Image: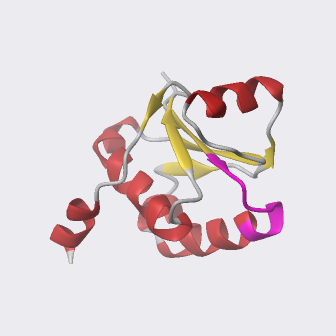
């Protein structure tokens, strides 16, 4: 079973690529292919409607997919990495349905 995080943002494609490249080159879970990071694309009408339900305006979307089911417990950590990098300019939906909230405390406890 595939598990995906749908990441919506108003940032431009070039900026998304830059941010995501830094994350994927520094985070071991991407380096080891435990998670896969897909290229961004423009949102379509349906995706615009989905994000509007959450009060979010997005231009682009990219996916993060779990590639190794043994690492499913790291989904929250991965989401928090992207919240840190994107700030308020990201909406992350688990399986494009359930909003994931940023948990600052979880990152603070790891430091």
Q: Quadrant of the C terminus?
A: bottom left
Let me know if residue 106 appears in the view: yes
- Who is closer to the viewer here, 34 or 49? 49
Horizontally, is 74 left or right of 43 in the view? Answer: left
Q: Is residue 77 above or below residue 31?
A: above
Q: Is residue 70 above or below residue 96?
A: below
Q: Is residue 104 shown in magenta? A: no
- Start-end of magenta stretch: 8-15
- Who is closer to the viewer here, 71 or 74? 74
Residue 49's quadrant in the figure? top right
The residue lying furthest to the left in this view is 109
The residue lying furthest to the front in this view is 55
- Who is closer to the viewer here, 65 or 53? 53
The percent position of residue 4, horizontal first and vertical second, equals 53, 35
- Who is closer to the viewer here, 43 or 40? 43
Residue 104's quadrant in the figure? bottom left
The percent position of residue 52, horizontal first and vertical second, equals 65, 32
The percent position of residue 21, horizontal first and vertical second, equals 65, 70
Let me know if residue 66 appears in the view: no
Q: Is residue 12 above or below residue 76?
A: below
Q: Is residue 12 shown in magenta? A: yes
């Amino acid at each position: 079973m595939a598990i995906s995080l749908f990441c919506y943002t108003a940032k431009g494609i070039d900026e998304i690529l830059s941010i995501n490249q830094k994350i994927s080159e520094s985070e071991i879970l991407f380096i080891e292919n435990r998670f896969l990071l897909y290229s961004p694309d423009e949102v379509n009408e349906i995706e615009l409607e989905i994000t509007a339900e959450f009060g979010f305006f997005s231009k682009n979307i990219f996916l993060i997919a779990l590639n190794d089911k043994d690492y499913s417990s790291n989904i929250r950590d991965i989401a928090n990495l992207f919240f840190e990098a994107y700030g308020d300019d990201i909406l992350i939906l688990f399986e494009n349905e359930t909003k994931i909230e940023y948990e600052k405390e979880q990152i603070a406890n790891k430091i």
